[in-house]
Image (cartoon, helix red, strand yellow):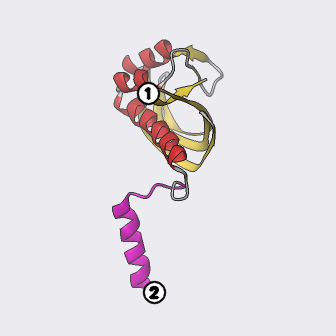
Amino acid sequence: MKRFIAFLAAVMILCGCREGTEEMTQDEKEVYALFETMQKAMVEKDLDTLYAIVTEDKTFTHMSGKKQTKEEFFGEIADGTLNYYGYHIHDPRVTVTGDHATFSADVTLDAKVYGMKGSWTLATRQNFIRTEDGWKICN
């Protein structure tokens, strides 16, 4: 039995199985992957990717309630006001209805924001829309 568990763990690692994605549809997996792409781009300060994956009118709301345009939010990532070091997605849920999708999860962010460093677990809900270019993050 111990060998079987070790084997199963090795297979999951080699297959790159992500928490909660095993039984998702293709659309749900694409939405999950795009959310994860955004998290990685925030960590890497990859502004080209960030601009490419959100709609023109996208706004962001901080845990404090502060709202920002994408230009303001991405600008603060670029200038070091917002520094993201890592993330962990807990219990992801994706719902797709036609060309609209919603991603929700608790997301733990390791960050330094406005001078305060810490790890925060945030109840996250993100909307997506299917476009000619694929899924995009939207309001």
| Marker count (numbered) | 2
Q: Dividing the image into 4 quarters, which one contains the N terminus?
A: bottom left
**Residue 111's x, y, as percent?**
46, 33
**Residue 64's x, y, as percent?**
64, 24
Q: Is residue 119 left or right of residue 3?
A: right
Q: Nearer the viewer, residue 92 or 56?
A: 56
Mark linked to residue 13? none
Q: Is residue 111 left or right of residue 104?
A: left
Residue 19 covered by magenta stretch? yes
**Which mark's residue is nearer the viewer, 1 or 2?**
1
The range drawn in magenta is: 1-20
Please name the residue that numbered disc 1 is placed on. 133
Residue at the image point whose x is 54% and y is 45% from the top:
28
* Amino acid at the residue labelled 2: Met
Q: Decide: is 131 above or below 11.
A: above
Residue 47 covered by magenta stretch? no
Image quadrant assignment for residue 100: top right
Q: Nearer the viewer, residue 73 or 109?
A: 73
The secondary element bearing badge 2 is classed as: loop
CA gap, disc 1 and disc 2? 47 Å
**Residue 22's x, y, as percent?**
51, 59
Mark linked to residue 1? 2
Decide: few, some or many residues near mark 1? Use Cα within 10 Å; few <14, some 14-19, many ≥20.
few
Q: Dividing the image into 4 quarters, which one contains the C terminus?
A: top right
The secondary element bearing badge 1 is classed as: loop
Residue at the image point whose x is 37% and y is 76% from the top:
7
Q: Main secondary structure of the magenta part?
A: helix
Q: Is residue 11 left or right of residue 68?
A: left
Precedes in sequence: disc 1 or disc 2: 2
Decide: few, some or many residues near mark 2? Use Cα within 10 Å; few <14, some 14-19, many ≥20.
few
Q: Are marks 1 and 2 in contact (CB under 8 Å)?
A: no
* Amino acid at the residue labelled 1: Asp
